Amino acid sequence: MLVISIQSQVVHGHVGNSAAVYPMQAEGVTVAAVPTALLSNHPHYPTMHGTIFEPELVGELLRGVEERGLVEDASILLTGYLGSPAIAERVARFAERAQRINPRLRYVCDPVIGDDDLGVFVAEGMAELFRDRLVPLASIITPNQFELELLTKRAARDEAGLVDASLVIAARGCPIVIATGCTLADTPAGMVETVLSEAGVLTRIATPRLPIRPCGTGDLLSGLLAAHVAKGEPPARALRLAVGRTHTILERTMARGAEEMTIIGMHNEGDPQ
């Protein structure tokens, strides 16, 4: 079981591959982690240092992934924060080659574009590249509610809207949409939902909304989802396991008063059912 994970890396904290790699490894999955950026920390701190990599470097790393035969061995390709349109285009070309080499490879695309609080926080042109190049290659996408609406130009604030938006994505080639951080018209007070949509059918998973919002929870969730799909779980079951584990980690983070997610030792407290 091998996941190729292409996203950012930080020295301090848990976002991008720094949120996803250890949890995937803890699930017994081998990870080939390809960085798109190396930063001191995520940008919500007062200062941040480091750089988004040159697309040529990312391309060289992806060439090495191919030359070592990792594409043939992989079950899942996972992408998150890509840094620049030029990197996104190279990743799209890699995904196309990888799917030709290994038709069994499933692509889980987290289209990191923005959120309700900050709006769009990626470079100009990234949203269009996700919409037109990466999403059509994916088997599963994991946008937050804001990103899903941006990609589809549909309001996804109730079941009908979510189905409509997901069918737009399906028409572009990606059959499964997992919308994260959702508050729908009938979401119970104090809850937040993660919703899987496939062929117009919704699977809704609600968890208590906690009074914390550490960075990287979407990266963690996508990584756990990818790990469980790589292990052979069907998407709905994989999502329930990923949501349960993510919520447990957030509860522990809150209990410890930690600013960053407490993911180390994540299997020391019983598995979610």
Image: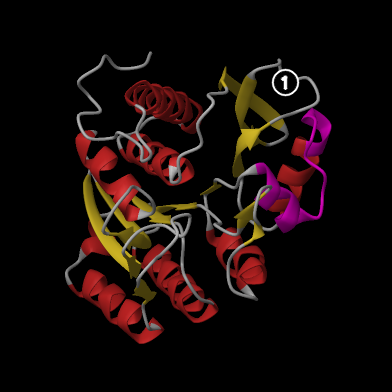
Q: Position of residue 102 (x, y in %)?
A: 35, 60
Q: Position of residue 187 (x, y in %)?
A: 72, 20
Can I make out residue 8 in this image?
yes
Q: Amino acid at mark 1?
A: Thr
Above or below: residue 15 compared with residue 204: below
Identify residue for label 1: 187
Q: Position of residue 54 (x, y in %)?
A: 38, 83
Can I make out residue 170 in this image?
no
The residues colored magenta run: 145-161
- Classify residue 180 by image quadrant: top right
Residue sitting at x 40%, y 54%: 78
| Quadrant where the image shows the C terminus | top left
| Quadrant where the image shows the N terminus | top left
Going by the picture, which residue comes out furthest to the left?
68
Residue in the foreground of this view, choosing between 259 and 77: 259
Element on which disc 1 rests: loop
Residue sitting at x 32%, y 49%: 13
